[in-house]
Image (tube, coloured by chain):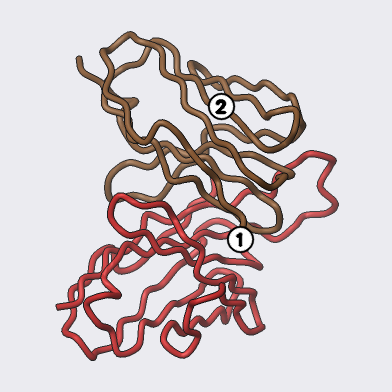
Amino acid sequence: GAVVSQHPSRVICKSGTSVKIECRSLDFQATTMFWYRQFPKQSLMLMATSNEGSKATYEQGVEKDKFLINHASLTLSTLTVTSAHPEDSSFYICSAREVSKGTLGPGLYNEQFFGPGTRLTVL
Amino acid sequence: GQQLNQSPQSMFIQEGEDVSMNCTSSSIFNTWLWYKQEPGEGPVLLIALYKAGELTSNGRLTAQFGITRKDSFLNISASIPSDVGIYFCAGQSGKLIFGQGTTLQVKP
């Protein structure tokens, strides 16, 4: 099955520093990757959609200058939390959608495969 | 914006019992999905529903896509301890919108 990895799985940093999180599709190519944030006991909230070779599309309320996304290849997207503050502490999860192999039949879902998440703690 | 209302928020049941949870939305979705998330991990897809009225099973799990395309339910039959986790519904209409989640605890 399709596997998505994230690195690191856990990071603790000081306030004001920047943190980079990597999302890799291990056995497939992904034209589109998604970044979600999940606070404790809450749902996943989409932050941005990352398309290979183009600028990311950010959801309303997400600061693009604070959460830098780079999708330089079909297997790697990175999220950099710049000048992190304690309120940025959260569980960050990426997902990847495989390059379309052709026209999907009616009713078929182009599945997003989720990574295991990265726990960010900002002190 | 689009929102999904998922209930119940949490359930604590005895092993062997059946479980039911549901999601409703004010918007129509093309696809409804059910995910399970275990602590410290990303969500894993359980069932995908594509057509209004569709009823789909995956082992002890059964899910239905409502006729109006605005709701879905998930049933788990004969629960076992490893069913413990957080279950999320999600609607897809371009992007995925997640429900608030149902935390399931199973007492052996």
Above or below residue A50? Residue A9 is above
Side (left or right) of A68 relative to A84: right
Residue lying furthest front: B26
Q: Which chain is brown?
A: B
In the image, B3 versus B90, the foreground residue is B3
Does the residue at mark 2 contact the one at mark 1 (Cβ under 8 Å)? no
Q: Where is residue A34? Give x, y as percent.
A: 54, 65
Q: Quadrant of the N terminus of chain B?
A: bottom right
Residue at 26% over, 70% down = A89
Q: Give the SS element for disc 1.
A: loop
Residue at 41% over, 18% down = B19
Q: Give the SS element for disc 2.
A: strand
Q: CA distance from mark 2 to mark 1?
A: 22 Å
Q: Where is residue B64? Give x, y as percent.
A: 64, 25
Residue at 32% over, 8% down = B16
Of the residues shown, which amino acid type is indicated by label 1? Gly
Q: Where is residue A3? Give x, y as percent.
A: 48, 52
The residue carrying pointer 2 sits among few (fewer than 14), some (14 to 19) or many (20 or more) residues within 10 Å by Cα, namely: many
Above or below residue A19? Residue A35 is above
In the image, B24 versus A49, the foreground residue is B24
Above or below residue A2? Residue A54 is below
Label 1 resides on the chain identified as: B
| Residue marked by disc 1 | B1
| Residue marked by disc 2 | B73
Give residue A109's mark.
none
Q: Which chain is red?
A: A
